[in-house]
Amino acid sequence: MRRRGIRHTIPEKSDRQATRLRKGSRGGRPPGFDEERYKKRNTVERAINKLKQSRAVSTRYDKRGYVFLGTATAAAVVIWLRT
C-alpha cells in the first residue's frame, strides 16, 4: 500500500504492534494513522449501513442505473427526514 501511495485509515491492532516491536529493526516501521480520516471513514460506513437497511437498496432489484440512483436517493431522503 505504501508503494501505491494509499494512506492508512484503520489503526494498527495491538497484537500486530507487539509483534512488530518484538522483531525490532526487522519489524518495519509503523503505519501512519490519521484520526480525522478514520472519523470520516466511520461516518461514511454508518451512512452506507443505514442505506442498506432499505430492502430495495440492499438487494438492488432495479435493472437500470438511473432507477437505482433514484431508489437510493429516495432512501437517503427518508433517512434525512427521520433525523
Image (cartoon, rainbow, N blue to C red):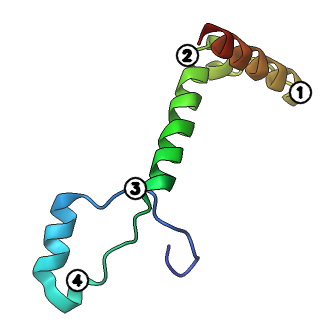
Residue in view at x 15 percent, y 72 percent: 19
Q: Earlier in the sequence, mark 4 or mark 2?
A: 4
Q: How much space separates mark 1 and mark 2, taking CA atoms?
A: 20 Å
Residue type, mark 3 in image:
Ile
Q: How much space separates mark 4 and mark 2, taking CA atoms?
A: 42 Å
Q: Is residue 56 visible?
A: no
Dot 4 and dot 2 residues touching (CB under 8 Å): no
Q: How much space separates mark 3 and mark 2, taking CA atoms?
A: 25 Å
- Residue beneath label 1, please? 66
Q: Which mark is residue 27?
A: 4
Residue type, mark 2 in image:
Gln
Other residues around mark 2 within 10 Å, as few (<14) / some (14–19) / many (≥20): few
Tag nearer the camera, 1 or 3: 3
Q: Position of residue 17 (x, y in %)?
A: 20, 68
* Residue situated in front as seen by the camera: 49 or 37: 37
Q: Which mark is residue 53?
A: 2
Q: Earlier in the sequence, mark 1 or mark 2?
A: 2
Q: How much space separates mark 1 and mark 3, taking CA atoms?
A: 33 Å
Q: Is residue 47 visible?
A: yes
Q: Position of residue 10 (x, y in %)?
A: 40, 56
Residue type, mark 1 in image:
Tyr
Other residues around mark 3 within 10 Å, as few (<14) / some (14–19) / many (≥20): some
* Residue situated in front as seen by the camera: 33 or 58: 33
Q: Position of residue 64 (x, y in %)?
A: 87, 26
Q: Earlier in the sequence, mark 3 or mark 4?
A: 3
Q: Which mark is residue 10?
A: 3
Check disc 3 and report its element: helix, strand or loop.
loop
